[in-house]
Each structure stands twice: as C-alpha cells, then as structure tokens.
Image (tube, rainbow, N blue to C red):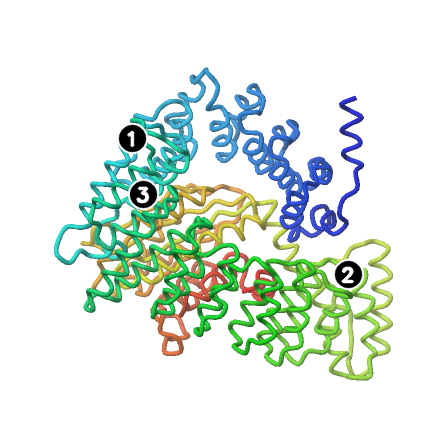
Amino acid sequence: MVFVAGLLLLLAPSNAETERMLLGDSPFFRHEGMRRAVAAGDRALLQRAAISGKWDVRRLAAMGLGAHTPHGLLKDPIAAVRAAAVEALDVTAPETLLLKLLEDEDDAVRAAAVWALRARTNKTPLRKLWRDPSASVRMTALAAGGGLTKLRKLATDDNLAVAVPSLAALGRAGGAAEAIHLLRALSKALTRHARGKRPVPLYLQETPHADIALARAVGEMARRGLEPGGRSLRTLIAKLVTTSKPSASGRILLAYAVAGSRDLGSARLILDGQVGSIAKSARSSISLQVGLEEVLYAFAQEPWPELAPLLSAHLRNRSPRVRAAVALALTGPAANKPLGDPAPMVRVAACSRVEDALVLAELVRGEENVSVLIAAAHGLGRLGGDDARDGVERLLRHADARVRHAAVGATLRVSMKSRDRVLLNVALGDVSATVRAAAAAVLDFHERNETILPMAIRMLVHEDIARRQNAIALIHRLTDARVGFDPANPKAGAAQWQQWWAAQKKHRKVTGGFRYHVADLRKRGLDIALVLDATGSMAPVIQATKRRLQRLIETLRELVPDLRVRIVVYRDAGDAFLTLASPFTHELRVLEDYLSCIPAAGGGDQPEAVLSGLRRAIVKTPWRAKPKRVVLLFGDAPPHERHMALLEATLREFKGSVHAVDVAGFGMGPRGSSKPNAAFLKIGKWGHGTATTLQNEADLLRELLVLILGPRFRTDIETLFGL
C-alpha cells in the first residue's frame, strides 16, 4: 500500500510552468521552480525532483520536501545534496547514517550532521569533534554536544575568527545560563561604547570587537523564547534598553538584539533616542544620521509586520537616505507607501520591497524617473507571474534604453504571451546594442534554441541589412559555431547555416557561453576570499559591502551551491592590527557578523599593508584543490613600494585569479577617477585577473558578481540578475 501511495504521488499532475522550471535543462530557473512547488504544496513534483539525474535538482528537492525528504539522499554522491538532505530531515534522519556522515569529507555535511544529532542521548561522537580543524564543525559540535561552557569562553576570545562563530553557535543552542551570560556581556559592551563625552561611532572605532555578533546572538536566544529565572529574555532586553542610556553605537547593538526579541516598545525607544540625538547635536549629525541608518538596517535584516507603523512615522524624516532605509525595512502592504515619496532614491528602495506586482505595474504608468522605472522592472521580475505582464510590456516600449534593458531581464520570470517572439524582435530590431545583447542572453537561458535558432536563421535573408547583421550576432551569441556569412550577400551564408542547423538537430550539439561556464563552476565549486582595506577612509565601502553581502552570497549560492567565502582585512604597521581573517565558511550569518565587527580606522600615510592582506588571503588560506579560486581586493591606497617585488612573486604563483578594485573615488560620483591606480593595475595583471574602479554602492553587487563569474559575461550577469 505504501508503494502504491508513493507511485500515485509521483504520477500526480503538476503545474507545467513550475515543472519546466524545476526539472528543465536550465539551472537558472530551478530555484524559482522549487519555490513555486513549495508554495503550491506540490509534493509530487518535489518527489520526482528527488530522483532526478541532476544533482542540483535533487538538492532543491530536499530543501522543498523538508521532513519528507527521501533518506536515500543522505548517501548522495554530491556533498551539496547530502548537506541539504541532512538539514531538511534534521533530527528525523536515521542515527546510523548521521554517525557515518560525521566522517564526511565536506565540512558543511559534517556540521549539518552534528547539529542533527543534538537530540540524541549519546554525546560521545560529538565530543570527539570539539577539536576539529574546521571552525564550523567545531563550534556546532560544542553547541550540540553539551560544550556550552567552553563556547562561553571562546565567545570572549580576542580572535574574531573564533569569537564570531562561537557566538553564533551559542545563539542557536545556548540555554538560560548562556542567555544571562551574554546579556551581561552586552551590558558591558554598551557601557564601553558610552564612555567619554563624545564617543566614537561603532563603525569608526580603532579596535575590533565582536559586539554586533554578541547582540545578534542575544536576539537569536530571545527569538527562541528563553526564560532565564522565570523572566522572558525579551523582557530583560527591554529593561536593558530602558536603563542603559546607550550611546549612538549602543543603540545599533541594541537594535540587533531587539530585532530578535521583536519588542515594539524597545524598537520605539531606540529609534526615538537616535532621532533625538540627531536633533540635539548639529556638530556630529552626519555620523548620527549614519547611525540611524544602521539601526534601520538592523531591523531590515529581519523585519516583522508589527514594526511597520513605527517605521512609517520616520518616512517624514528630512533625509532621503533615512527614508530609503525605512523603505527597505518595511514589509507587507506598508512597503507600498514609500512609492509616493518625492525623492527618487526612496521610490527605488521601495520597489525592492513591494510584494504586489499590480502595485508596481500601476507605478509604471505614471512614473517618469528612469532610475525608478528600472527598479520597478527589477521588482516586477522578482515577483513574476501574470500580474507583472502589463508593466513589463509597457517598459519594453519605453524610450530609454536603460529601462528596456531592465524590462528584458524581467521577462525571465514573467508569464508573457509569445515571449520568444517578443524577445526575438528586441534582439533583432532594438536600436541599442546593449538591449539586443540582453534579449539574446535571456533567450539563451530560456534554452529555446530549437525555436529561436530556425527563426534567426530565416532572418539572415531579411531585406533590412541591419536585421541580417543582428541575426548573425544573435546566432553567434546562442552558439559556439562560426559558419561564414556575408550580410551583403546573405543567400549563400543562410544556406550554410541551414545545413549546420540540420546537423545540430540530428546530433543535438548546440552550446552557448555563460550557461556552460556556470555549469563548470557547479561541478568544481567556488572559493572566494574578499580582501578589504580596513583603514579609516574605507568606512563607507565596508558599510556598503555589509549591506550587499547577503544578496551576493544568496545569488552566488543559487548558481554554485558548493560555495565558501572568507573575509580578510588589513591596515598597516602601527595600527591596532595588521591583518585579520574569518574562517572559510558557507554560513552567511558568520560572514555578516564578522564583517560587522570590523571598524574602519587607522591608516594616515598613503601606502597600506596590501602585501600582508593578499598574502593572508593567498598563502595562508586553506584553499581546496578542485574549486575555482577567486580573490577580490578592495582598497583606496597602493601597497608600499618596497613590497612590490614580493607581491608580484606571490600573485604570479597563485593558482587562481586576483581582481583589484580601486575605491578611492567611492561616493564621489562623476568626480571619481575612472582608472585604477598604477599599483592596482599591476596587481590585476600579475594575479591573472583585472583591475577596475568602484564609485558608488549601487554598482557594488554588479561588480562583485562580474569579477567572480567572469568579466567577459558582464551583459549576461547584468541582464539575468537585474543589475
């Protein structure tokens, strides 16, 4: 009977579009297909995905099925699938299989197995891992195996690479005693930051502290409903907010704790206190204003609906930057309100939060600002579905090429009648080469070659020579073939292409570019080291990177699930530190906390310890043998001249790529230099990579993805990810 029930489940009908996304040939729609299957409760489709021959489909099936995940996926040959299966099954996974996975070669699998074993009575296998070389495995084993006392000690370690993951583990597993311990530590941190008549803002202090990781751990414990001494942790956090008289930096810390406790009264006190400080202090209003943005950012990371009325009151703030931060922290219907703000930057922020495609489609009808229309196109693409179609079709007809480019990208997830023909017309007839290339990229990733290529080949004899030229460009974009073609004498060339296409249909050998590049990364995996100058002038860049880190990691992980990231920061001799480095990890929370705990300070003279930072990332990093290795250097000052010879030798020997990003003009707009400094040009050359500049936060995510995935695929990346 069980077999028959399972067979009936597998044979149950599914939504055709969702099935095409999840089980089709294109990996770029599979995550969206899984999301739709889960939303529709389509367990039959997810069960079919669990026996797919494609490993990333099996991984997504485990993520969608949860406790219904087949136990066989715990033995899958691909590590990313095993890890997803363990996390999905959690404590329901068979103990014998979990114990076997403790010896797995992949750290993510082992850490997941450790956590799933936390409810078992025999803790001996977990305690054997308390000294494991992997930080994620070691901390998880301590949390799951009863080593909370040891974790408490590690959480106060001066080494952030130890303290930050320890605090994250305590937040996830600690009990009442650990909650009180961390709450006291948070109280001491608030006192330390409040010392002096004019305390230095948190993000500009000299010495790194794991205070934000501490505050987030307290918030995580509050979310779990701990009640030390019979009083809820939420109540104790509220008391700390009321009695501590925090500085501007202290309010940022408390905001991270309150984001977990979700106490509306505490959130109101923090926001009112920050706004009051701005009103009283004209001299330091800029740093306090940034502090208010940081408080709002803390709330935006995990917004809860009840916070919306309180945040909406701050949409009357005089600063557009603050109102934009409020827009990013709103959720649900409240996110629609900032769409009527007079400042375009606020409307742009709101477009990323609106959850109703009809609202954005209505905005498109009357909006004139190009930046807002581009953001609306991205929002429509994010939401997808039939309701987004009218808005996208309107944007495809807009006079500005930048708007049309964004609208082309939105067609990825929007249901449109005759979408292939619409995109083909754009690829052949749009006046902008960028828009034509974008349409070609989307057609490629729709994997509709059997439909598009014959149509494009027929266009090779079109009466308009421009269309013929665009048709051959499209064919070249969709394939690796280079059959001869003369636009001035098209018939002979078109006949050759017809013969070529007949052969391809027989042998099915059509290949493209970016899609196959990503397929290779998915097989190999990806290791990234993000190297940041942490001197005083880099504060805006570090803050911007922190705000964009989540989307960067989530986007990359959708493409390359086997992803690890490490953050390395450097200053110069005589500063509070020379270099610091996080562990290589797949955990976004640890990376966010680590970066948040690094203030930008020190420096002074022009050259910085670039060599030390790059050597920490290249020579002293546990790279894996198979995955692609990428190092991204962000700085605004060159290395010391005396270090250049050793720097060249280090970079030339590196079996990976190093990209240098000069951010000396960050925030300066058109006034910033468009050419990297000479030393960064050399670093890009020696490191088998490139050198570029970055002038504003809006371009940060795009440039990171372009450098990581390959500069030659810029058009694909900009189009497919709405950047």
Q: Is residue 454 left or right of residue 320?
A: right
Distance Cα–Cα, label 3 vs label 2: 52 Å
In terms of image quadrants, where is residue 357?
bottom right
Which residue is identified by label 1?
Answer: 152
Q: Position of residue 721 (x, y in %)?
A: 57, 60
Query: Of marks 3 and 1, which one's residue comes earlier in the chain?
Result: 1
Q: Position of residue 405 (x, y in %)?
A: 61, 71
Q: Is residue 266 left or right of residue 412?
A: left
Q: Is residue 698 left or right of residue 98?
A: left
In terms of image quadrants, where is residue 296?
bottom left
Residue pictured at 47% horizontal, 22% vertical: 119
Residue pictured at 20% horizontal, 51% vertical: 576
Q: Amino acid at mark 1?
A: Arg
Residue pictured at 78% horizontal, 24% vertical: 3
Q: Quadrant of the N terminus?
A: top right
Query: Of marks 3 and 2, which one's residue comes earlier in the chain?
Result: 3
Disc sitting over residue 215 in the figure = 3
Residue situated in front as seen by the camera: 215 or 547: 215
Distance Cα–Cα, label 3 vs label 1: 14 Å
Which residue is identified by label 2?
Answer: 449
Nearer to us of marks 2 and 1 is 1
Task: Please tell me whether residue 146 is drawn above or below residue 508 in the rendered image.
Answer: above
